[in-house]
Amino acid sequence: MGHVSDIDMTVKQLRELVAGPVLGPDDQGFEAEAVTFNTTVNARPALVVGALDRQDVAASVRFAAEQGLAVAVTSTGHGAVPGGMDGALVINTSRIREISVDPQARTVRIGAGNRWGEVVEACAPFGLMPPAGAAPGVGVVGYLLGGGLSPLGRVFGFAADHVRALEIVTADGTHRRVDAEQHEDLFWALRGGGGGLGVVTAVEVGLFPVSSLYGGTVFYPGEHAADLLRAFRDWNDGLPDAACGSLALQRLPDVPQLPEPLRGRFVVALRFAYPGDPAEGARLLAPMRATAEAIIDTVGELPLTAFGAIHNDPTEPMPVWDRGDLLPALPDGAIDALLSAAGPQAADAPTLVELRRLGGALARAPRQENALGVRDAAYTLFVVGAPGAPSGPGLFATMAPWTLGAGLPTMRGEAPVATTPEVAARLAKIKATWDPAGLLR
Ligand SMILES: Cc1cc2nc3c(=O)[nH]c(=O)nc-3n(C[C@H](O)[C@H](O)[C@H](O)COP(=O)(O)OP(=O)(O)OC[C@H]3O[C@@H](n4cnc5c(N)ncnc54)[C@H](O)[C@@H]3O)c2cc1C
């Protein structure tokens, strides 16, 4: 492989085997099939298959094995990493779509191509909520494979803890159902252990009854960062497991999409979510509301389908540098270090520095053990900055005495995955069993 003429031939052969589109680098629409949310990741697949169903996936995997091509998977591109798709036969699963809710069993079956926003829309009429992440545009499968941290994580636990079954095409090209009874090793590994064990075609996930959601963001002037960080830490320590908070130091762009008072400003954004009585939610939030005067306070009763308004994550692809980490605790020294790197006096700071409180159900072992190696940290730290800017790596160097040096699989950017030697060894063994030739990236 590797010559353009070979690729043309390969594309032609695969078109005979699958129903979905097969595109080579010279074909129109090729780039759109491997689009990445972080636009600095310039994906260069050998060829791309837009799989329509599990038969297309199985045929593509078998074909790649015969041709000696590596297989990579993409759906929304939110989790694309540099080099992840380069030179590979990329299977785009975004066309494999299916959402069926079972309100009695409180489960939902979801195709590999669906995004969380669509799943929440389908479940909300039943008063049920899946363990979705902050952004409606994130894909279901990539998020679940990496554990998945919801803005309601302290209530729900990690999303992977609620996966009941997966359907997957393994490296031998066979479609299998994986659950607590069948292929237990894969069931353990696919919930939090990341990708690379097969191409998931569908998942079944447990749902939570949520009668009412109180949530949103309180934006404060950045000058109050020191008071707010300390108040946030103390407030979190007394917060019940049913409430969730995140605090972000944000350098906002001067763009018309933002409300006028926020444009071009350094702000502290407190994100709050409470799936219960709004009056109780307001009572729990009161100490943070009293810490400083807000610029804008959007926290209120939200329809479940408006869950994206808790964090207000970006919805359009952009060039970013990002990295995540975990903190066992947030002592004064860690707060001072964070302020020196990203507080009001910092000369050059990353665009977003976010602390999310963990604990609650996130810290409890799931009913069925899974591959999420570290679940007892107190906070995740996630930082987004401009590509190449020294402030992001500089912040992690400053924070090193207080961090683990590794992040949650879905929120680590360029950092290693936080795990244990036992989990890493068990995952490596399962990979060697199911993909001995290392076909799947
Ligand atoms: C704006 C934004 C907000 C986010 N918010 C959160 C959050 O609140 N909580 C959280 O935990 N994470 C969050 N994330 C991270 C997100 O969960 C990961 O980036 C995740 O990998 C995205 O999955 P995807 O399928 O959308 O992305 P893709 O880039 O399409 O896939 C990412 C990877 O997942 C694997 N994969 C995807 N589909 C399959 C499949 N069918 N079979 C096998 N492997 C597959 C592949 O390895 C692929 O490279 C956020 C990311 C962004 C950009």
Image (cartoon, grey):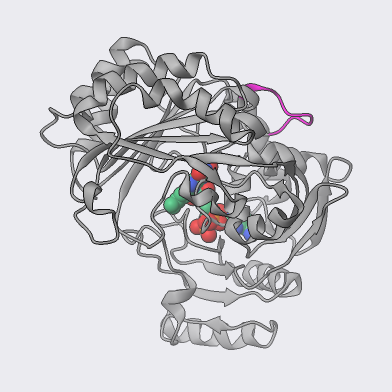
Q: Please identify the dominant SS of the magenta region.
A: loop
Residue 132 shown left or right of residue 223 in the figure: right
Q: Is residue 316 visible?
A: yes
User: What residue is drawn where x is 31% and y is 16%?
Assistant: 334
- Relative height, residue 432 to residue 344 (above, below): below
Residue furthest front as drawn: 279
- Magenta residues, start to end: 363-370
Residue 315 rendering spot, x and y as whole percentages: 41, 59
The reply to whether the magenta stretch includes residue 368 is yes
User: In which quarter of the view is residue 355 placed?
Assistant: top left
Where residue 2 sits in the image (x, y, percent)? 44, 74
Q: Quadrant of the C terminus?
A: bottom right
The vertical placement of 198 against 226, above or below, is below
The percent coordinates of residue 248 (x first, y second) are 34, 35
State the residue at coordinates (46%, 67%).
87
Query: Who's the residue at 64% across and 42% down the image?
Result: 212
- What residue is at 54 percent from the left and 49 percent from the top? 307
- Magenta region includes residue 326: no
Asked whether 178 or 345 is in front, the reply is 345
